[in-house]
Image (cartoon, coloured by chain):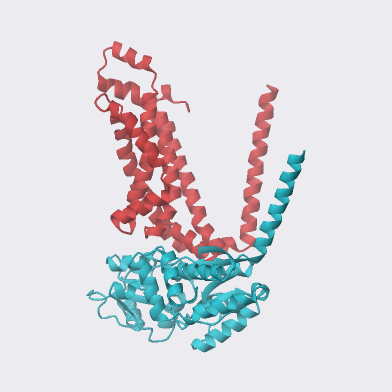
Amino acid sequence: MKCLKSILAAVVAGAALTASAQADEIVVGGKNFTEQLLLAEMTAQLLEAKGFDVDKRDGMGSQVVRDAQLNGQVDVYWEYTGTSLVTYNKVDERLDAAATYDKVKELDGEQGLTWLDASSANNTYALAVKDGVEDTGSIKTLSDLAESYNQDGGLVMAVNAEFPKRPDGLPGLEEAYGFETTRADLKAMDSGLTYQALNEGQVDLALVFATDGRIAAFGFRVLDDDKGFFPNYAIAPVVRSDTLEANPKLAEPLNALSAKLDDQTMQALNAQVDVDKKSIENVATAFLTENGLI
Amino acid sequence: MAEHVAVAGLHRLWRIGILILIFALGAWAWSSGLLPTMFDLWDDIVYLGRQHIMLVAISGGAAVLVGVPLGVALTRSAFRRYGDIVLQLLNVGATIPTLAILALSMSLLGIGDTPAIFGLFILTLLPIVSNTLAGIRAVPPHLIEAARGMGMSAGQILWKVELPNAMFVIYAGIRTALAINVGTVPLAFLIGGGGLGELIFSGIALNEFSMMLAGAIPTALLAIFVDFLMGQMQLWTIPRGVNPLR
């Protein structure tokens, strides 16, 4: 009997402990490509070093992680201003970088999300071809590409799961540049593989992210967005306003990390993972230590 | 007798219940706007469904063509002693997660539909070979002895006694393998292999339920159809005397 009581006491104490631990736990979210996996890992390590309890959940699709944050299942993750503007908030206006940031800060603020400081890294969508390939050698801009599709078509594009259906993706691009792709022009795959597909010549062009290290490493040429269709995709930490109120110390380290990120830094970090095959944990730790963040 | 009537009644109740359930599901799907969105994706479903069927037909067909003869060969006296080793290897192979098999074949063959077909082929091969082995080994020894007593050659015994008696188990293996195959093809999307997985994964990434269903429902229907087809073949191609279905 005594034994039973002590077990019961232990269970109750344990439950109380985990409950109190959960109250302070910060859930760090992330999407399903290298840059996001890196950002989530850096955030987790950074917050752990600042004494927070961290639970990292990455590898989600854009809309999924956004919904999870609105539902309170994710406290913080790194979002792109353009994605929030066009995909989540359905804004069609063409805005410059600063106006985009202000707009999403305002619109998401009404939904209980706080945008911290944006970094100067702009991870915009881009379409790339491989240098030195004859078929696509004369295509320098997205207008050239549209013309090629309108004349004879037949170019095959490697895309990820989201791009063909997102308003700031292919449907919007086709409308802005006045062209149309057929089902056979698209080869969809896991987002990181588009680079390999283009590099191995299995497709003529590939959807890439501007901050990806493989663009330079594989000798890709990014097509110029001459009509300025793609909005600015500055990377910024987004926190649930409730979480931020309960943990005001959250903002300072995240803003400090955001300030260290620009296009070159992001490209170099991504390349360490995708080209040099270093582990995400090691790259994150090295970057945070070198910059004196942890 | 009374029991029989009760069972028949129960069956009828079941069938009516299922029909009502299907009707309710359909009505809900239509009213919530799921079905109309799915019809918007009709072009995608047709295009990707065709790719899906091609992947199943090539990888599954090749696995049947290779798997059954391989299984039979492993029961012949020349290779019989390797049978157990191969069976063990196949069992170990069957424990590798399907995604890992696709990832491995991608590292060998690059991306696109070639590695997808190769991975699906390996995946489908395992249950077919192991069932063929098991089926032929389970043929009652007295049947073979009797056949031998009648003066049949080894080849005649295989064609007239062993294969017909093992056929049911072999078919069971093929049905299992093809069902797994159809259900695994969606993962081929991840390595650029095409198929209905594209709709499922796009649906997940964009959190669009109807897009996920537009991929998942045709995949499920295809699996049911393939299994039905194999069931019919099982019914009509196995000789009457040794067919438990007839």
Give the chain letter for red: B
Residue at the top extreme of this rendering = B149
Residue under the point 29% across and 68% down? A199
Q: Quadrant of residue B122?
A: top left
| Residue A235 in view of the camera | no
Quarter of the image with the N terminus of chain A in it: top right
List x then y, in percent, for residue B33. Answer: 61, 64
Is A115 left or right of A218, judged from the image as shown?
A: right
Chain A drawing hue: cyan
Is A184 left or right of A4, judged from the image as shown?
A: left
Q: Quadrant of residue A105?
A: bottom right
List x then y, in percent, for residue A184. Answer: 36, 65
Number of marks in picture? 0
Residue under the point 41% across and 34% down? B171
Is residue B29 shown above or below A263? above
Residue under the point 54% across and 82% down? A117
Is residue B46 shown above or below A71? above
